Image: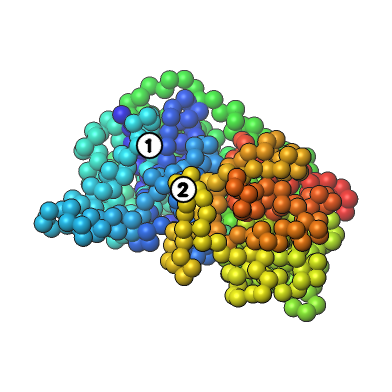
Amino acid sequence: MARFIFITGGVVSSLGKGLMGASLAALLQARGYKVRIRKFDPYLNVDPGTMSPYQHGEVYVTDDGAETDLDLGHYERFTGVPGRQSDNITSGRVYSDIIAKERRGDYLGATVQVIPHVTDAIQSFAKNLTDDLDFVICEIGGTVGDIESLPFIEAIRQLRNDVGVENTVFIHVTLVPYIAAAGELKTKPTQHSVRELTSLGIQPDVLVCRCEHELPEEERRKIALFCNVRKEAVIPALDARSIYEVPLNYHDEGLDREVLRSFGVAPRHAPDLSRWTDISDRFRNPEGEVTVGIVGKYTGLQDAYKSLQEALVHGGFANRVKVNIRWLDSELFEGDEPDLDALEPLHAILVPGGFGSRGSEGKIAAIRFARERKVPFFGICLGMQMACIEGVRAAGTMAASTTEFGTTTEPVVGLITEWMSEKGLEKREEGGDLGGTMRLGAYPAILEAGSRIADIYGTTEISERHRHRYEVNNAYRAPLEAGGLVFSGNSPDGLLPETVERPEHPWFIGVQFHPELKSKPFEPHPLFASFVKAAVKQSRLV
Ligand code: GLN
């Protein structure tokens, strides 16, 4: 049976519980264990799919088509284990399942209550599909004391009784703030937060204390004493230079050792951390740097493009260069006489995925700049769609557009209502619900032999993750190809364009899918490695 590690947070939000969990998973993996990480989100949305990236950051899509919390992206980047629908639940999903059952009459007349029905559902989610694992790490979103997280805390308390103390470890992440006027780190908020947690029936085994300064022995001893944990189990967590050094830092502070000790497990062998020391070396000792511009809509909140940002960093690791990202709001490039000066110093331009028409003309202007000036260009999802619209406009059809932005006489991109997936024919209604009506998750694509993209992947058969409603319209294939934009990859039935490229350009590729979701620091995605390589080349020209 798998052992369970539960992570809660206290004092404030944004303490990096997700990164902590991902790092712990990586460390346990490095010791040879099989690990999976899960996220429990206390909000009432059924999934984060309908939430604005401004509110909640990126929606991370899994192979099986789940729209999940961005922490699942960290988990996958740190462990290489692909996330699944069953790795993320929200209160909304738990309640909607329970209410659907209640309406069907499945509860046979019983009164349906938070305890036991909601807490049972949460426990079975935690235990679902865990037989082949050594450890399951479950992160509880939010902060202890929130009304919303109470059922989750109660469920994990019950779960400890159910599977046994020896099979569960509770880790609580808190903040130890530094008060400049006193020149001291303060442990009181941590004490209060642990008191709150114990009042809910949970005594943490390990405390992770985020702090801006070294935690002095005296403070560590004090926290241990007041919070009823061993001094060695008070793990200081200072800010790291790179998120990819966090696993090494936690290992140095003894996190994985303390967790195993709490389980009463003698470590099998020392962890093999070579993967992480290599990444740290690439991060600390770059041999050059390049500047990549991301021209998009949500540039004010970088979490909205978390995986993209990380994939570019990975592309930098692959080429041993530092990638500087310049976030550019595409609306800057709109108007009759757009000022494109901000594009001049860039070594490469990327137009990412997005929804809605705001800023689209600016994206098209940036793509035109990249095409004409032969600057490496990468268009992802909406970015590829815009590159196709730009291509049709370049051939003289100025009305080229997408039906996503309203009715158009030239639907270069349009809504498709039927397509094939592994499950068979999928259908969507023209004015259907926004939630869960997209082409979501992994789909195969066939790449044209001899195309640049096939060369980059080193194969003609790929599978990548999708999240979109609209598709490039095959009816425009001939005029686009006449203008130099080749459809180099397609769905296996040939109906849906998956990738486009300009063979005459140094590096101009558009993809309908989101390759950034599968990039890892220790296995950079080939498209990002190649794109950054093209940026390095470009940097030598300018
Ligand atoms: N808005 C576009 C669509 O729905 C693109 C989506 C995306 O970039 N993820 O097809």
Residue ID at (56%, 28%)? 273
Q: Residue at x 11, y 56 (%)?
A: 109
Q: Please, what is the three-letter code of the amino acid marked with disc 2?
A: Gly
Image position of 159 (left or right of 516): left
Distance between mark 2 and mark 1 Cα atoms:
33 Å
Residue 424, numbered circle = 2
Q: Which mark is residue 136?
A: 1
> Dividing the image into four equal quarters, which quarter contains ligand 1?
bottom right
User: Residue 522 location, x and y as percent?
Assistant: 61, 35
Q: Between residue 134 and residue 391, name the one nearer to us.
A: 391
Q: Residues within 10 Å of mark 1 (few under 14, many from 20)?
A: many
Q: Residue furthest left?
A: 109
Residue type highlighted by circle 1: Val
Kindly indicate whether the residue at mark 1 contacts the one at mark 2 (C-beta within 8 angstroms). no
In front here: 49 or 198? 49
Find residue 327 and report its image quarter.
Answer: bottom right
Q: Residue furthest right?
A: 541
Which label's residue is closer to the chain start, 2 or 1? 1
Q: Is residue 504 left or right of residue 285?
A: right
Of residues 349 and 208, the one nearer the viewer is 349
Does dot 2 land on a helix, a strand or a loop? strand
